[in-house]
Amino acid sequence: MKNPITYLMSVLLVVLPILSSSASAADPEKDEDRLRNSGTVLKEILDVPDDIPQDLLDKADCVVVFPSVLKAAFIVGGSYGRGAMSCRRGQDFRGSWGAPTMMALEGGSFGFQIGGEATDFVLLVMNERGASGILSSKVKLGADASVAAGPVGRTASAETDATLRADILSYSRARGAFVGVALEGSTIRPDNGANKQIYGQEVPARQIVLSGHVAAPLSAQRLISTLDSRTPRRKS
């Protein structure tokens, strides 16, 4: 017989995506709303003083936004969210910001827990290796050199050990507090089903983000305009 904790976690991680997929199929406008919410959340976070350091934002190749990631826990914890990722266009990610691919975040954890909250996440993808990993397959965010909690504050420098070694820097905003968070145990991947609804056909996430030939939908206007205004060109 399976360990009860293992069984509960398995049920949680299976049921949450199914419920979300069913809701999305029943209401296609939800994907448009998620894309609009991603732009709203990004603007709000970047407008907060002492938030993501400008020098780190200017060095990022891509930005991923997950608005209102749900974290629920009763004995076994889990998280589930949907968002979007945009990358700089052109060679070596030097151009303006391009059309977004929809993204999915899923994760779980063991331990005696109870409670729940919704958290907004912003991930800075700092190099081509990080971008390629996310676009190619499901990427697990672990406590290693590839993923780090981003430093916060105007004096935080990109020259710290964590940011020098990290492919991805993670930030979060929960209940009005802004802190750096490493999403241990969670996975992120392209949400191909949502992309099909947004763009009206099946388009690979890599083609959407990197080809430069896919037009951004109107629902992505705030996301793209915020990135273009705050960090129009990548800096070395």
Image: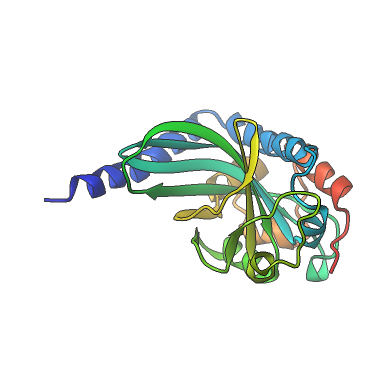
Asked whether, in this view, residue 114 is left or right of residue 168, the answer is: left
- Where is residue 121? Give x, y as percent: 61, 44
The residue shown at (81%, 50%) is 154
Is residue 182 depicted above or below 112 in this figure?
Answer: below
The residue shown at (30%, 45%) is 9
Quarter of the rendering containing residue 77: top left
- Where is residue 185? Give x, y as percent: 44, 55
Asked whether, in this view, residue 11 is left or right of residue 93, the answer is: left
Front position in the image: 74 or 210: 74
Is residue 44 depicted above or below 150 in this figure?
Answer: above
Front position in the image: 81 or 178: 178
- Where is residue 157? Give x, y as percent: 77, 61
Is residue 176 depicted above or below 134 in this figure?
Answer: above
- Where is residue 37? Give x, y as percent: 67, 34
Is residue 122 depicted above or below 93 in this figure?
Answer: above
Q: How many marks?
A: 0
The residue shown at (58%, 67%) is 146
Asked whether, in this view, residue 71 is left or right of residue 61, the answer is: left
Front position in the image: 45 or 85: 45
List the single residue furthest toward the left.
1
The residue shown at (16%, 51%) is 2
Quarter of the rendering containing residue 147: bottom right
Name the colour scheme.
Answer: rainbow
**Residue 200 in sight in this render:** no
Front position in the image: 49 or 202: 49
**Residue 193 in sight in this render:** yes
